[in-house]
């Protein structure tokens, strides 16, 4: 028995409740060492997400990438082409590791996300073109193209779904963003139905960021509202999940075999040291959702996490938290817009650093 197996049931218990745990990390070493395969087998990990920050850290520290750099530099002049030549084979390899799960789940699990270039965040047509190019380059049915939830990204989402491509819509911070993302997803499916195209096995998730929202809200709360610290994001997530579960308007698409756009909880590593380190896993478990976790959070939950259907807990209480935040002058949609801008800046900088690393 390997060292992970003894407590792997803690993570597999989450899958038993209908939630998928994805790993928020990808590197060549993770694949070549067999670690990702072990997490899939022992812990029931059902997908992987990546972003420019993850790849920057991986390429800088992974000896396998360092060894491959001279050949990549010799073969490609453009740093972005070098980046894709370096990492897309690993995206494909990860897709292949998850292929049995993808097939067994009839296309509902086993996805690997790769992001369009951050420089395209405000370019809808460019995003569509890049998504189509990356989808073809990866060439795996369980790839998932990440698109940011900017105005342009949401417009692109409709087109990319219409093209039959799996999409992870990232950097969702507010209810207003989420509503716009859901509407665009449905417009893309509706256009496929109008064109008499299949809507089956077109997967999409809306990546709702958690800890960043709490960090931003907590910094604005007055001393009199200290009891609300660390509660905003979970409350908003529970309300969003309740609305998702009770929205019957997707039934027309389900009748044609379409899969709803699942909620994915991102940024689930705890930033507040006073909070339990698995809070954003334990408090956000519900059927037909995904939680993408960094490896440290995966290890912590494996060690001492408790699985229960927490997303359905006290929705009225969650709504009361949101009402109290409003009374204290906390505008979550405004905060969400600020966090979106900050998130885009972070990924743009990580991407620039990444390309500089490969120059």
Image (cartoon, rainbow, N blue to C red):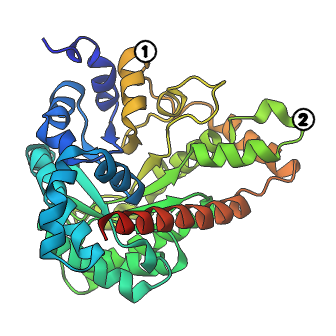
Is 125 drawn above or below residue 332 in the view shown?
below
Is 215 drawn above or below residue 153 in the view shown?
above
- Along the horizontal axis of the image, is 244 left or right of 261? right
The quadrant where residue 188 appears: bottom left
Quadrant showing the C terminus: bottom left
Q: Name the one closer to the observer, 79 or 332.
A: 79
Residue 88 tag number: none
* Marks 1 and 2, how far apart at CA: 32 Å
Mark toward the start of the polypeptide (1 vs 2): 2
In this rendering, does residue 243 appear at all?
Answer: yes
Residue receiving disc 2: 223
Secondary structure at badge 2 equals helix
At a point 27% along the width and 47% down the height, the residue shown is 26
Marks 2 and 1: in contact by CB < 8 Å? no
Q: Residues within 10 Å of mark 2 (few under 14, many from 20)?
A: few
Residue 304 tag number: 1
At a point 43% along the width and 72% down the height, the residue shown is 118
At a point 57% along the width and 22% down the height, the residue shown is 276
Q: Name the one closer to the observer, 16 or 344.
A: 344
Is 109 drawn above or below residue 273 in the view shown?
below
Quadrant showing the N terminus: top left
Secondary structure at badge 1 equals helix
How far from the left and from the top, in percent, is residue 51? 38, 57
């Amino acid at each position: 028995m390997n060292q992970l197996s003894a407590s792997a049931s803690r993570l597999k218990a989450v899958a038993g409740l209908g939630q998928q745990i994805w790993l928020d990390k990808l590197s060549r070493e993770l694949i070549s060492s067999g670690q990702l395969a072990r997490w899939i087998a022992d812990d029931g990990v059902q997908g992987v997400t990546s972003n420019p920050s993850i790849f920057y850290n991986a390429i800088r520290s992974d000896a396998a990438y360092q060894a491959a750099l001279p050949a990549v530099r010799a073969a490609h002049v453009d740093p972005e082409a070098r980046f894709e030549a370096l990492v897309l084979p690993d995206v494909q390899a990860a897709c292949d590791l998850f292929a049995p799960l993808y097939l067994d789940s009839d296309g509902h699990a086993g996805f690997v996300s790769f992001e369009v270039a951050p420089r395209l965040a405000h370019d809808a047509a460019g995003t569509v073109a890049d998504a189509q190019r990356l989808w073809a380059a990866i060439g795996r049915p369980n790839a998932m193209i990440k698109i940011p939830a900017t105005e342009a990204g949401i417009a692109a989402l409709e087109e990319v779904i219409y093209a039959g491509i799996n999409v992870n819509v990232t950097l969702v911070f507010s209810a207003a963003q989420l509503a716009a993302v859901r509407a665009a997803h449905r417009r893309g499916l509706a256009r496929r139905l109008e064109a008499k195209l299949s809507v089956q096995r077109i997967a999409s998730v809306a990546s709702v960021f958690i800890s960043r929202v709490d960090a931003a809200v907590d910094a604005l709360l007055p001393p009199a509202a200290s009891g609300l610290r660390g509660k905003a994001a979970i409350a908003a997530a529970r309300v969003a999940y309740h609305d998702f579960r009770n929205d019957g308007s997707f039934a027309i698409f389900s009748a044609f075999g379409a899969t709803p756009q699942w909620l994915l909880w991102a940024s689930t590593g705890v930033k507040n040291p006073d909070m339990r380190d698995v809070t954003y896993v334990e408090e956000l478990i519900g059927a037909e959702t995904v939680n993408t976790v960094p490896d440290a959070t995966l290890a912590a939950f494996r060690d001492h996490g408790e699985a229960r259907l927490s997303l359905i807990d006290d929705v009225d209480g969650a709504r009361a938290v949101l009402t109290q935040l409003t009374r204290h002058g906390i505008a979550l949609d405004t905060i969400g817009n600020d966090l979106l801008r900050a998130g885009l800046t972070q990924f743009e900088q990580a991407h620039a650093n990444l390309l500089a690393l490969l120059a």
